Image (spheres, rainbow, N blue to C red):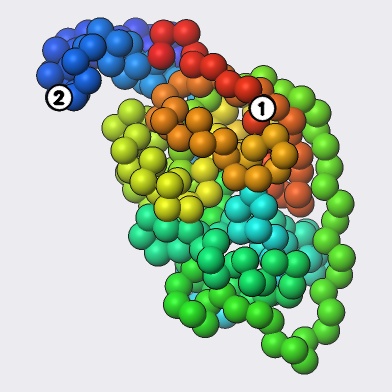
């Protein structure tokens, strides 16, 4: 690991002038440090593997209860040996599905589309109108969703990304090179995630929220793609961990 970091440092020092000349900010030393900080962060984070698309539904739909805070989530009840799941939802391009999910809040809904997955990060990309709508009235009532579990207060170092691209929709889907794309996706409603350098309950991906459970604080948008330190409470909804951030700071050297 140390040998690998040393090699990356040598590469960075050699390419530093090239990287700097391509950056728009006139404060080149700061931008160099940010690029280096992002590189060091990626080296410190245990790789969850490459992201990929998965057409697991083959035109079928998942049935669950729709939640819209902090972002649209479909809570799917346990089924036999399959445990209950909470799946983040996003739309086509650089957009979320907030406007389509809001009328379904608290109701049984059916969702279809294509999964994008990377490690414990799972997101369902919704297709056309038939891929997100109220469940059929004749369906039996869904079980009550499991209670939220509070995992306590945490202080974590990592990177803010949009959940769609970091799961594999774009390559690279993380880092300074992806910052502008991440900002557009998050601004368009794609659920933002935090990629931590240290796991919590075996998870390194966390859906981001404000301290009151709403969408990610607006002040964090400009921090996407940069090493940051976040503090707040983490809660579990089925297999999904949600980081409710109440304070943040840039990682030294970022």
Give the structural element (helix, strand or loop) at label 1. Answer: strand
Q: Position of residue 32 (x, y in %)?
A: 27, 13
Q: Position of residue 136 (x, y in %)?
A: 70, 87
Examine the image and state in which quarter residue 133 appears. Answer: bottom right
Examine the image and state in which quarter residue 236 appears. Answer: top right
Q: Residue at (68%, 81%) from the top-left corner? A: 135
C-beta proximity under 8 Å, tags 1 and 2: no
State the mark number for residue 163.
none
Q: Position of residue 31 (x, y in %)?
A: 28, 16
Residue 203 visible here: no
Mark 1 or mark 2, which is nearer to you?
Answer: 1
Residue 163 visible here: yes
Count of marks placed on residues? 2
Give the structural element (helix, strand or loop) at label 2. Answer: helix
- Please identify the quadrant where the C terminus is shown: top left
Examine the image and state in which quarter residue 149 appears. Answer: top right
Residue that label 2 marks: 22
**Residue nearest the viewer, comparing 103 with 254:** 103
Residue 168 is left or right of residue 101, and the answer is left
Up-down: is 186 above or below 22?
below
State the mark number for residue 246.
1
Q: Residues within 10 Å of mark 1 (few under 14, many from 20)?
A: some
Residue 160 is left or right of residue 13, and the answer is right
**Residue nearest the viewer, comparing 96 with 203:** 96
Q: Position of residue 80 (x, y in %)?
A: 82, 69
Up-down: is 133 above or below 53?
below
Q: Residue at (19%, 15%) from the top-left corner? A: 26
Question: Mark 1 and mark 2: span between their CA atoms?
Answer: 34 Å
Q: Residue at (75%, 89%) from the top-left corner? A: 137
């Amino acid at each position: 690991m140390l040998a690998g970091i040393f090699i990356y440092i040598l590469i960075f020092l050699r390419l530093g002038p090239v990287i700097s000349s391509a950056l728009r900010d006139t404060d080149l030393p700061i931008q160099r440090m940010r690029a280096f900080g992002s590189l060091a962060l990626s080296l410190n984070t245990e790789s969850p593997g490459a992201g990929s698309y998965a057409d697991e539904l083959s035109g079928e739909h998942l049935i669950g209860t729709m939640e819209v805070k902090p972002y649209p989530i479909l809570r799917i009840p346990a089924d036999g040996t399959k445990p209950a799941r909470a799946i983040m939802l996003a739309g086509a391009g650089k957009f979320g599905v907030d406007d389509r999910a809001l009328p379904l809040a608290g109701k049984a809904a059916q969702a279809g589309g294509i999964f994008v997955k990377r490690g414990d990060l799972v997101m369902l990309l919704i297709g056309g109108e038939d891929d997100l709508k109220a469940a059929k009235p004749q369906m039996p009532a869904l079980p009550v969703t499991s209670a939220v579990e509070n995992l306590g207060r945490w202080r974590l170092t990592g990177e803010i990304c949009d959940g769609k691209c970091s799961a594999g929709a774009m390559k690279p889907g993380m880092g300074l090179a992806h910052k502008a794309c991440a900002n557009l996706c998050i601004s368009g409603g794609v659920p933002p995630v935090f990629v931590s350098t240290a796991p919590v309950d075996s998870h390194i991906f966390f859906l981001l929220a404000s301290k009151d459970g709403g969408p990610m604080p607006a002040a964090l948008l400009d921090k996407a793609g940069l090493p940051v330190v976040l503090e707040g409470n983490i809660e579990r909804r089925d297999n999904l961990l949600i980081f409710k951030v109440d304070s943040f700071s840039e990682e030294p050297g970022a």
